[in-house]
Amino acid sequence: MPNRLLLNDRITQSIALAGRQNRPIAVLFLDLDRFKYINDSLGHRVGDKLLQSVSKRLLAGVRGSDTVSRQGGDEFVVLLSEITYPGDAATSAKKILLSVSAPHSIEEHDLHIDGSIGISVYPEDGEDAETLIKNADAAMYHVKEKGRNNFQFFKADMNMQAALPSGFGLN
């Protein structure tokens, strides 16, 4: 899987092409829900195998032109470099959530795990790799706060909410 540097390069290249072709691209930030519980209760070896299983499913579920990158821990970023409409990212997010949530058979365990996905779309949500990843991450945290195992498109007020002290959230 590509590292952060290669992911940033691929996003930058996709932005340049999308800008010339006047079309969107999407960045999906996936965090596995309650992965720490599995890792802590069954051990790091099982946790690592679960991450490998998730990685395989992610790679199998995207097109060859897309990029899947592990950001560390239980976080992944998916670059959808050839979408026609922002709604295409929602379709991909639904497929990813279904794929990840199917049981993973690892060392005689059928493990069930869900994911939370934040989505940012170029050019509306950012015009560079760092901003698109940051905004997809903010949207993912919004999903976690609202109950997990879902996806959410980035909205500008998410960054304002993240900057406010606890108890000062906007509705």
Image: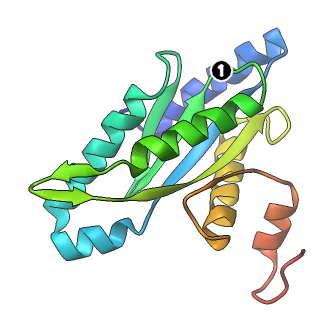
Residue ID at (16%, 69%) = 43
Residue ID at (53%, 37%) = 95
Furthest toward the top, the residue is 21
Residue ID at (69%, 59%) = 138
Relative to 36, residue 74 above or below = above
Which residue type carries mark 1? Ser
Q: Is residue 156 left or right of residue 141?
A: right
Q: Is residue 2 something that shows in the picture? A: no
Residue ID at (31%, 35%) = 56
Relative to 170, residue 134 above or below = above
Relative to 98, residue 140 above or below = below
Quarter holding the C terminus is bottom right
Q: Is residue 155 something that shows in the picture? A: yes
Q: How did the renderer colour the structure?
A: rainbow
Which class describes the residues within 10 Å of circle 1: few (<14), some (14-19), or many (20+)?
many
User: Could you tell me how many numbered marks the image carries?
Assistant: 1
The answer to which quarter of the image holds residue 147 is bottom right
Q: Is residue 40 left or right of residue 26?
A: left
Which element type, helix, strand or loop, lies under badge 1?
helix
Q: Identify residue for label 1.
A: 14
Q: Residue 25: give x, y in percent of width and height.
A: 71, 27
Quarter holding the N terminus is top left
Q: Residue 148: give x, y in percent of width and height.
A: 57, 65
Q: Is residue 43 left or right of residue 24?
A: left
Relative to 91, residue 137 above or below = below
Furthest toward the bottom, the residue is 167
Q: Residue 132: give x, y in percent of width and height.
A: 70, 42
